[in-house]
């Protein structure tokens, strides 16, 4: 194990793991309904040149996920052709980006040995390793949530732009990869951690982030697509926000609704609710920004 954790051994084990994953990405056909379905959605995005609405088939929109993964897969198709390697490559790149965030976080909070351990543990975890070469949205969600949580913790002691604003960039990635679930996965551990460290440490981390500008950055990146998707295929917000995040858990047998049924939901209602949410967020950011500056102790 010590050999593997030496610098040369660590690099070689990463190279071998990535090479084996690339080999599988090239040789193994699309293996389940998820890969085939998402790959076809990305292919249709290329052939129709429609970068707003993902489509199951030319007359059936796919409202179950935001488009970030499909965007990356479609761009990969354009670059490398329509094949298994091309559609799987974005997941591998997202996993490597997550590994970099883990490396930097562990290096700044621990030692080089800790950083190597952390990366090896993550990249050899069965689920992460399989997902790194599969056509899925999860690697992008993982990247967004990991970046946000690492940035929140490091902001007071490592005030580089990619930590201070990385929290909000991570939220934007999560919102475009999986939707509001990214907010839950990010803020739930922060709320719990802040309750445990409510003596002052939590406020230190909260104050270190540029909440007003950062929140505007998240909205600038993430919000336009949600508005465009609803305007292009009315009913999307009702299906995705209400259906996918609430009805599927509280209504037995809920299997989604037709495009026509979802389109009957008032578009004005959701745009008004969104505007109200943005306004409330603005007031919250103003309150946070008005807190007194200064933070004496790090984590």
Image (cartoon, rainbow, N blue to C red):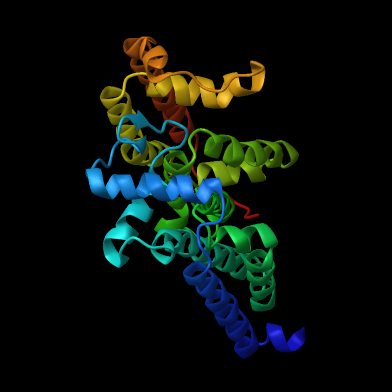
Q: In this view, does 181 lie to the left or right of 109?
A: left
| 26 lies left or right of 270 | right
Q: Looking at the rendering, in which quadrant would you find the C terminus? A: bottom right
Q: What is the total number of numbered labels drawn onto the structure image? A: 0
State the quadrant of the N terminus. Answer: bottom right
**Relative to the observer, which residue lies in front, 85 or 209?**
85
Residue 122 percent coordinates (x, y): 65, 64
Instruction: Determine if residue 231 is in view.
Output: yes
Note whether 159 is above or below 119 in the view shown.
above
Question: Can residue 167 be seen at all in this image of the molecule?
Answer: no
Q: What residue is rendered at 34% in x and 17% in y?
A: 271
Q: Is residue 186 above or below residue 254?
A: below
Percent position of residue 142, x then y:
55, 51
Across and down, in percent, residue 12 comes to 59, 86
Residue most extreme to the left:
49
Please report the residue visible at 58 percent of the width from the left and 41 percent of the height from the top. Answer: 186
- Taking depth in this image into account, of 100 and 111 the one nearest to the observer is 100
Q: Which residue is drawn at 52% across and 42% down?
A: 207
Q: Where is residue 123, by image quadrant?
A: bottom right
From the viewer's perspective, tell me whether residue 119 is left or right of residue 139.
right
Residue pictured at 39% horizontal, 10% vertical: 265
Rendered image quadrant of residue 115: bottom right
Residue 159 at x, y percent in the picture: 47, 58
């Amino acid at each position: 194990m010590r050999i593997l954790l030496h610098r040369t051994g660590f690099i070689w084990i990463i190279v071998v793991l990535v090479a084996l994953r690339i080999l599988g990405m090239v040789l193994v056909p699309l293996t389940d309904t998820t890969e085939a379905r998402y790959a076809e959605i990305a292919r249709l995005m290329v052939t129709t040149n429609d970068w707003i609405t993902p489509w199951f088939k030319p007359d059936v929109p796919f409202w179950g996920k935001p488009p970030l993964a499909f965007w990356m897969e479609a761009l990969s198709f354009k670059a490398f052709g329509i094949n298994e390697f091309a559609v799987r490559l974005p997941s591998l790149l997202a996993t490597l980006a997550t590994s970099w965030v883990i490396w930097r976080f562990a290096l700044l909070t621990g030692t080089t040995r800790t950083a190597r351990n952390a990366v090896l543990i993550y990249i050899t975890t069965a689920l992460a390793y399989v997902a790194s070469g599969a056509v899925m949205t999860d690697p992008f969600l993982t990247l967004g949530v990991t970046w946000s949580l690492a940035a929140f913790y490091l902001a007071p002691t490592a005030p580089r732009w990619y930590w201070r604003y990385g929290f909000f960039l991570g939220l934007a990635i999560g919102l475009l990869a999986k939707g509001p679930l990214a907010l839950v996965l990010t803020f739930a551990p922060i709320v719990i951690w802040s309750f445990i460290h409510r003596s002052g440490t939590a406020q230190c981390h909260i104050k270190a982030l540029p909440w007003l500008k950062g929140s505007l950055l998240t909205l600038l990146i993430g919000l336009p697509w949600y508005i465009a998707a609803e305007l292009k295929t009315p009913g999307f917000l009702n299906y995705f926000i209400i259906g996918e995040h609430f009805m599927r858990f509280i209504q037995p047998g809920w299997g989604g609704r037709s495009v026509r049924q979802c389109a009957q939901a008032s578009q004005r209602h959701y745009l008004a609710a969104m505007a109200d949410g943005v306004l409330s967020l603005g007031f919250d950011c103003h309150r946070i920004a008005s807190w007194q500056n200064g933070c004496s102790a790090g984590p």
